[in-house]
Image: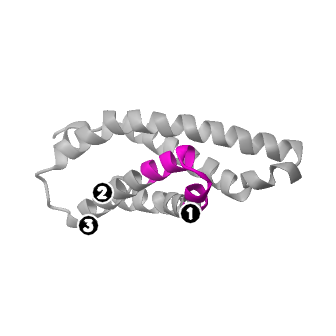
Amino acid sequence: MRSAHRVVGWGGNGFAMMSLVLSVLWITGWVMYCLPADTLAEMSQFQETLRRSSGILHGVLSWFLCVLLGRTVWPHVGALWYQRKHRSQWLWGLINLQLLGFLSAGGLLLMYGNASVHDGMSPWHFGSGAILPVCFVAHAARRFMR
């Protein structure tokens, strides 16, 4: 029997790290959305520290996610490129790829864009990031069912 790493292009460690990083990004994204930066003056010291720490952690982990994607996802895609047995898995994989691309571009616009771009992009970035776990679990559902 072939090993799982050879079949899907990544092992349990890569999957665990990807799940952990995406989970922490999701949590810190919710914290930043629920405690918007324009209300920093009205926040308690704890809320302000939580908001700032979440922003820093979110930024650092987003760059770490890029490293993980390069290390784990491309071998995963390469191993499964010609195996089109499970069309729904492919569809969820493509949705994940597009969603992550949109989130990356949105994150760069949020970080480096002007105020009007920031105000317009923030709800889109949060909304697409909030549904990312659903797409990730739907794509990896077969792994959980084994």
Sequence-first tag of 3 and 1 = 3
Sequence-first tag of 3 and 2 = 3
Q: Residue at x 43, y 41 (%)?
A: 18
Amino acid type, callout 2: Gly
* Cα separation between marks 2 and 1: 27 Å
Q: Which residue in the structure is indicated by mark 1?
A: 120
Q: Secondary structure at mark 2?
A: helix
Q: Which residue in the structure is indicated by mark 3?
A: 88
Q: Residue at x 44, y 48 (%)?
A: 104
Range of residues picked out in magenta: 103-120
Of 101 and 12, which appears nearest the observer?
101
Residue 132 position within the rendered picture, expressed as x and y whole percent measured from the top left: 46, 58
Magenta span: chief secondary structure: helix
Q: Secondary structure at mark 1?
A: helix
Marks 3 and 2: which is nearer the front? Answer: 2
Q: Secondary structure at mark 3?
A: helix
Please determine whether, in this image, residue 16 is positioned above or below residue 94: above
Q: Residue at x 59, y 41 (%)?
A: 58
Marks 2 and 1: which is nearer the front? Answer: 1
Residue 105 is covered by the magenta coloring: yes
Sequence-first tag of 2 and 1 = 2
Please determine whether, in this image, residue 93 is positioned above or below residue 5: below
Tag 3–tag 2 contact (CB < 8 Å) = no
Residue 93 circle label: 2
Amino acid type, callout 3: Ser
